[in-house]
Image (cartoon, rainbow, N blue to C red):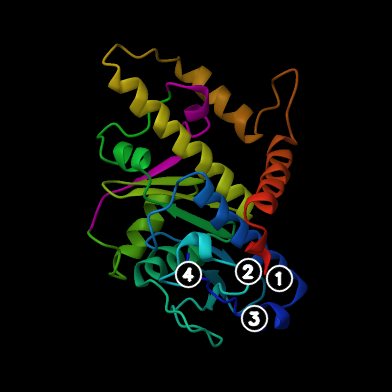
């Protein structure tokens, strides 16, 4: 791999909060590599920075995800223009999709988009994601769908994309791929990890060619509430699983790609 020098000035000048977000976002990029969810240089993960300026960080166009570090992330505004010097451009499709969601959803601090094989396979199926497994039930009634309109280069698509996402944590972009949002990079990544795994399970199950076992809608809804922390009817609740999983993932990144934080 050709070495890409970090643009360290950005990290040095950043506030403590921006430094933290840069490192968390860079960690997510490396995790997406590790779990084989990349598409060379052509998908995006962005995070909104605090403050009234509506600035956010996104990947430098042209770098593989394994080359992304905290300091070489590009800071842009809602118009897609860099707000500080950076030698790398921004993917225009990334700007169209991500800026629309950041502008419309205050809770969408992080937006993660992928073109995985399983995700694209389910995005090509008319019925979409089926609640045939506990993992997929996390998204029961909580998943939007957006019809394909070509490569996301037209600003007119933004309003329809945002409307189709609604208040859901994730959306399937038909004939395109998957997208998740989160209040943190950790939340957006874990949602994507399990959404993609749900798609993998479905493609494997349907390939067997046998009848699928389905559950009663009430069971699907209960499971969704249990997995998203919205259930108060069960005898026990797991309110720390995602935090523990994210801490474990950060330890993984430290082992496999310690340069992510520079």
Comparing marks 4 and 3, which lies closer to the viewer? Answer: 4
State the mark number for residue 70. Answer: 2
Q: Is residue 136 magenta?
A: yes
Q: Are marks 1 and 4 in contact (CB under 8 Å)?
A: no
Residue found farthest to the bottom = 85
Q: Residues within 10 Å of mark 3 (few under 14, many from 20)?
A: many
Q: Are marks 1 and 3 in contact (CB under 8 Å)?
A: no
| Circle 3 SS class | helix
Q: Horizontal and vertical percent for residue 30?
A: 56, 55
| Circle 1 SS class | helix
Comparing marks 1 and 4, which lies closer to the viewer? Answer: 4
Vertical side of 85 occupied by 94: above or below: above
Where are the magenta residues, as a range?
132-149
| Circle 4 SS class | loop
Image quadrant of residue 159?
bottom left
**First in residue order: circle 1 vs circle 3:** 3
- Closer to the camera in the image, 170 or 196: 196
State the mark number for residue 2. Answer: 4
Q: Is residue 142 visible?
A: no
Query: Which residue, given by chain and number where applicable, does mark 3 sit on?
Result: 10
Q: Is residue 123 visible?
A: yes
């Amino acid at each position: 791999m050709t070495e890409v020098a970090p643009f360290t000035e950005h990290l040095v000048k950043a506030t403590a909060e921006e430094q933290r977000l840069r490192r968390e976002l860079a960690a997510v990029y490396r995790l997406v590599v590790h779990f084989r969810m990349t598409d060379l240089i052509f998908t995006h993960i962005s995070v909104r920075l605090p403050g009234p300026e509506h600035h956010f960080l996104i990947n430098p166009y042209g770098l593989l995800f394994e080359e992304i570090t905290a300091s070489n992330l590009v800071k842009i505004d809602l118009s897609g223009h860099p707000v500080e010097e950076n030698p790398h451009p921004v993917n225009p499709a990334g700007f169209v999709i991500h800026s629309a969601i950041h502008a419309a959803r205050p809770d969408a601090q992080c937006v993660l988009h992928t073109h995985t094989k399983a995700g694209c396979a389910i995005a090509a199926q008319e019925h979409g994601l089926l609640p045939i497994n506990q993992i997929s039930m996390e998204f029961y009634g909580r998943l939007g769908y957006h019809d394909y309109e070509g490569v996301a280069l037209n600003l007119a698509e933004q309003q329809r994309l945002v409307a189709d996402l609604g208040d859901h944590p994730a959306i399937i972009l038909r004939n395109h791929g998957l997208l998740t949002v989160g209040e943190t990079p950790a939340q957006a990544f874990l949602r994507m990890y399990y959404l993609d795994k749900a798609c993998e399970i479905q493609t494997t199950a349907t390939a067997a060619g046998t009848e699928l076992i389905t559950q009663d809608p009430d069971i699907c809804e209960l499971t969704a509430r249990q997995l998203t922390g919205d259930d108060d009817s069960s005898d026990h609740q797991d309110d720390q699983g995602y935090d523990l999983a994210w801490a474990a993932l950060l330890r993984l990144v430290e082992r496999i790609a310690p340069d992510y934080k520079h």
